Image (cartoon, rainbow, N blue to C red):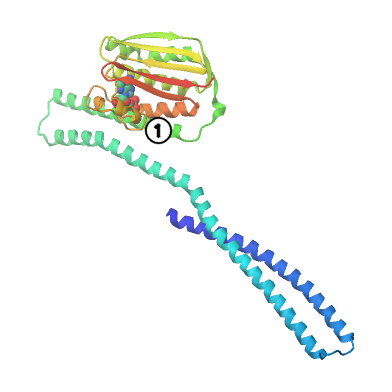
Amino acid sequence: MFNITRIKLTLWYVAIVAVVSFGFSAIIYTGVISEIETSFRQAESRLQQMSPGPIPRRVALQILKEDFEKAKNSVLYRLMVINGVIIGASGVAGYILAGKTLRPIEQMLIEQKRFVADASHELKTPLTALRTELEVALKRKKINTKEATGLLKSNLEEVINLQKLSEDLLRLTRYTQSFERSSFEEVDLEITMNESVKKVAPMAKLKRIKIVKDIKKIRVRGNKGMLAELMVILLDNAVKYSPKKSTITVKIHGGRGAVIQVSDQGIGIHPKELSSLFERFYRADSSRSKNETSGYGLGLAIAKQIVDKHSGDISVSSKPGLGSTFKVTLPS
Ligand code: ADP
């Protein structure tokens, strides 16, 4: 489809250039020819008035006429050559330009197709589990209350997961789209972090995880809701991938802009997986195997989008078995 569009665009370029070029040539041709014609008429009338010389007047006039025709043809030929070169060059340039113009659109479409394919794949797994459970239960002649409750609980869990997945997908799509920087305001990172810590506190409490804070009062320009979401993602992961009774340290300090750091003493990430961590749907091998750490690998992709929208940077350092530190740098 893109190749056909590229050729169509090239043909349009060439057609426009050809119209302009032929238009100019027609003007030049008419001007030059009328000049030559005037000179020819003058030479002709001078010849008529001259007394007959060694060359008969008729022959001299014939030579003049032939020269005039030659000059006309030569102008026409040169203009045609120039037009040919211009059209040929514009065809090549048009093809290259059309390719360059279409490439980002093509890239965006490929990316969108991949997103839809990935999303459908992720949605299929919990939906299939849900359907199988229900079908198996329906095939049974009798089902007691305990079994029915168990089934409903399991179904509800799947539905909650699906709801979270669709919400994350929507959020990711929203953040990938162009974004109004006018919604930026002064955000107090200390207040935002304290609010975010409160959100994950119940989950941390369940695992008896301590959250230690070392936070300086720093403000940045940004979107408060998005920054809060970013902090919750990092804190939520730190809790999810940490063992019971461990410690999570949250630091916010200044520098060039603001630096937010979330460190844990969790399972860590293998060095070969670090570079893929911020890709959507990516889950490290260590977390795939653990059922308790449910997730779809969208959190860090959303975090990256939020940081990008704030022209910041996000990085991770980790030692398997010892813990990880996620570092976000935001311009002030
Ligand atoms: P999710 O946690 O839902 O799987 P994320 O995008 O938030 O998705 O994280 C992607 C992967 O990065 C996780 O599956 C996990 O393997 C790894 N990860 C993220 N944060 C941590 C962490 N603090 N400690 C260890 N691994 C982590």
Q: Is residue 99 above or below residue 193?
A: below
Position of residue 212 measured from the top left corner of the image (x, y, whole percent): 37, 8
**What type is the residue that disc 1 sits on?**
Leu
In the drawing, does residue 100 fall left or right of residue 161?
Answer: right
The answer to which quarter of the image holds residue 160 is: top left
Label 1 within 8 A of ligand 1 by Cβ: no
Residue at image coords 71%, 70%: 29
Position of residue 137 measured from the top left corner of the image (x, y, whole percent): 15, 33
- Residue 295 seen in render: no
In the drawing, does residue 11 fall left or right of residue 194?
Answer: right
Q: Is residue 89 above or below residue 158?
A: below
In the drawing, does residue 237 fall left or right of residue 8?
Answer: left
Task: Assign the N terminus to one quadrant of the image.
Answer: bottom left
Q: Is residue 171 above or below residue 247?
A: below
Position of residue 84 measured from the top left corner of the image (x, y, whole percent): 59, 66
Residue at image coords 44%, 53%: 2
Q: Nearer the viewer, residue 89 or 14?
A: 89
Task: Assign the C terminus to one quadrant of the image.
Answer: top right
The answer to which quarter of the image holds residue 85 is: bottom right
In the drawing, does residue 305 fall left or right of residue 35?
Answer: left
Extreme residue toward the left, this view: 141
Q: Nearer the viewer, residue 133 or 146?
A: 133
All told, the count of numbered labels is 1
Q: Nearer the viewer, residue 104 or 200?
A: 104
**Residue corresponding to mark 1:** 170
The answer to which quarter of the image holds residue 33 is: bottom right
Residue at image coords 37%, 44%: 113
Q: Quarter for ligand 1? A: top left
Which element type, helix, strand or loop, lies under badge 1? helix
Position of residue 213 measured from the top left corner of the image (x, y, whole percent): 40, 9
Bin the neighbour count of mark 1 within 10 Å (Cα to Cα): few under 14, some 14-19, many 20 and up: few
